[in-house]
Amino acid sequence: MAATNRKIVLRNYVTGFPKESDMELVAAGGAAPSRVPEGTDGAVLVKNLYLSCDPYMRGRMSKSDGSSYVHGFVVAEPITGYGVGKVVDSRHPGFKAGDYVWGMTGWEEYSLIKDPTGLFTIRHPELPLSYYTGLLGMAGLTAYYGFHEICAPKEGERVFVSAASGAVGQLVGQFAKLMGCYVVGSAGSDDKVTLLKEKFGFDEAFNYKKEKDLNLALKRCFPEGIDVYFENVGGAMLDAVLLNMRVRGRVAACGMISQYNLDRPDPIHNLTAIITKRLRIEGFIVSDHYDKYREYEEKVARYVKEGKIAYVEDVTEGLENAPAALIGLFSGRNVGKQVVVVAKE
Amino acid sequence: MAATNRKIVLRNYVTGFPKESDMELVAAGGAAPSRVPEGTDGAVLVKNLYLSCDPYMRGRMSKSDGSSYVHGFVVAEPITGYGVGKVVDSRHPGFKAGDYVWGMTGWEEYSLIKDPTGLFTIRHPELPLSYYTGLLGMAGLTAYYGFHEICAPKEGERVFVSAASGAVGQLVGQFAKLMGCYVVGSAGSDDKVTLLKEKFGFDEAFNYKKEKDLNLALKRCFPEGIDVYFENVGGAMLDAVLLNMRVRGRVAACGMISQYNLDRPDPIHNLTAIITKRLRIEGFIVSDHYDKYREYEEKVARYVKEGKIAYVEDVTEGLENAPAALIGLFSGRNVGKQVVVVAKE
């Protein structure tokens, strides 16, 4: 076995649109690790199987001004993010060799996780393990918590989801349908629009890149207006949504992916609608709500087994292709949840 | 008695900044009315004493596109708005001649109010009646409900109020001080800043017209950031506030007076803060919450008698001067609550 521990490291802090060359693959010397070193009680050694590419990671590529809710990456150190792995060795009482886990890990073949409080053991390894990078992990709880708790939806309400075929959006739409809502999604290609309607059961969907006027597109899909908007994109879409919200509408601000690579965010003009329509706009970050995770895992594992939830992943093979996969999120290249396979087992 | 029933009517729908000549004084012929006409059961005839000038009235001067929460004014008909009056005659079981009332009335000497469901009898006529155009009426409940219910403040939190010497702002600041908050206000003149600190007990205040950079002004007053923002102005101030909010901050969107005369509202750039800081921004309209009014009236009438609340009015004498008083709101000419005296009794 000539296995070492290949890693993807950040080469430099990023401004504007990130490039593959902002990251690089490096091979650490020596054999692959197999033990938690002595003197590191509480640590867990994980073999990484699947890595998650998520839009929030863009913020971590910038030089931190200390204002963000996540720490920035460290130049020359591995990218970190959510992933699924198998415990190789453990000096932590909550984990043992052979456990499958998901949580914060490194973009490398093996990660020594010194503080595994952010790791969850996987209770349904009979389901595809990669689902724990999305549906059964962070993105799934994001969709569920954001929709049910922040949006406070009622049966029959009119729900709009942007970036609707993405990891979070596809689930929000299906949770909304399960509640008996009317659901419309926007996405960036005709294929994604087809997916929304045919695979995920959205009532309507549109390709925002083909619409000359987002306000008119929304009026066409929501002649009576929008009760609930699940915000993943920001910018011009948010501005158009504000014009189409109904009185006492709610906006869950989950992400604004259209804004992350801009030096100066796009202008929003229609905020007086917040007053005239008594809107509530609320931001949330799922990591504040992991106390709800176990309940979520059981409920949605059951949904999957019952065929109540469809789920589409965009799977990239190989750690070396992780940088391209991550960057693809910002041009919408991925169709569904973007996963990187490091190893199958 | 040569009294007729002089009125202020709207001459034309307004775009941009309103002018006095958009309204005019007209004298209806005949004697002043003294009876509710037969056949109008349920109506009340009110002699108007004090009229309220409020920023939301600007929206009613525009040609309505049906989207606003208030009906527009009607050209050639009297302006309508909040006021205080005395019942001259009543065919409604809830009101009798001699009652003092406040609520929606006309900008005229006498108003026949066919549907008086929006009128409240005044339970504390021993206090200055004009207070029922503001402190003890709509503006007061707006400040109280918006601050306590929408902002959900906690003792010791850091509160910022814009348009802080206005009818609503001066009260928000004092309610916040009564709760033990740190309170800063912005206003548009040095005299108003002095008023905020010396009369209303704000901890700090600044003249936004003299600040080169609103972001820096807020950082100076809130080195640790803002927990609660009571939004009265919108535009550049809101954008600067977003940069200075603390995690889990709350914004009560009450008004955006800086935007009401603009064809295209000012751009807001910093909305990603909603996510990174998990902010809640919520609009409200006080007329949805008049079920809370009687409780409010008793509490604040007591505060006034105990000297716990200071209140500053800007009093304009004469119905004929009402148009100038209303327009003055949009240049910040008024100092405190803008009232128009039609008659003293």
Image (tube, coloured by chain):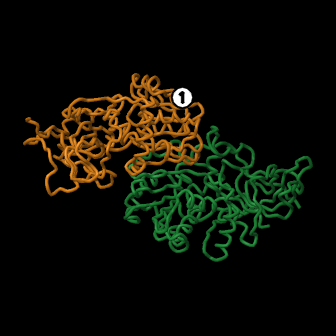
Chain colours: A orange, B green
Residue under the image location 29 percent in, 43 percent down:
A101
Q: Quadrant of the N terminus of chain A?
A: top left
Residue A152 in the image: x percent, y percent? 53, 44
Of all residues, the one furthest to the right in this rendering is: B38
* Residue B32 visible to an observer of this rendering: no
Find residue A194 and report its image quarter. Answer: top left
Q: Say left or right for A134 vs B199.
A: left
Residue at image mark 1? A221
Decide which of A182, A297 is in the foreground and name it: A297
Residue A69 in the image: x percent, y percent? 34, 52
Residue under the image location 40 percent in, 39 percent down:
A140
Decide which of B133, A250 is in the foreground and name it: A250
Of all residues, the one furthest to the bottom in this rendering is: B306
Relative to B336, say whether B291 is above or below.
above
Q: Chain of mark 1?
A: A
Q: Say left or right for A290 vs B4.
A: left
